[in-house]
Amino acid sequence: QVQLVESGGGLVQAGGSLRLSCAIVGRISLMGWYRQAPGKQRDVVATISSGGTTMYADSVKGRFTISGDTAKNTVYLQMNSLKPEDTAVYYCYADLWTSDYTTSPYWGQGTQVTVSS
């Protein structure tokens, strides 16, 4: 059974910090975070491969840090220096290996992050 369970969203003032967590059930190839603001498309925030390679959207470089705990099958997103434009629903994402050695994408339910000015 595949399951992505997120936690850690909430309301914070500009300049503050939040940490998102996502527990993943399955064999991970790639995991990460996307976000979707009202009226906008869902965009990638950061990803981390099973080998530890990370990628960040330009808008969050230097402020957000993605990390993974392979023992706990959990991915984290530490968000510092938050700005009102970071307000969005944040979705955990994972590419998981299937029994036929391909990968399939899975999404969490989303967690709201609101940054007040």
Image: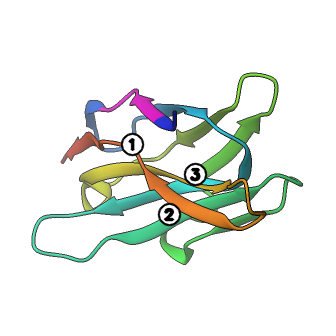
Give the CA distance from mark 2 to mark 3: 9 Å
Give the CA distance from mark 3 to mark 1: 12 Å
Q: Nearer the viewer, residue 114 or 15?
A: 114
Q: Is residue 40 magenta?
A: no
Q: Is residue 29 left or right of residue 52?
A: left
Question: Do tag 3 and tag 1 residues touch (Cβ < 8 Å)?
Answer: no
- Figure quadrant of residue 11: top left
Element type where label 1 sits in the image: loop
Task: Please tell me the numbered disc located at residue 64.
Answer: 3
Q: Residue at x 57, y 63 (%)?
A: 104
Question: Do tag 2 and tag 3 residues touch (Cβ < 8 Å)?
Answer: yes
Residue type highlighted by circle 1: Gly
Residue bearing the label numbered 2 = 45
The segment highlighted magenta reads: 4-9
Q: Residue at x 60, y 32 (%)?
A: 25
Residue bearing the label numbered 1 = 15
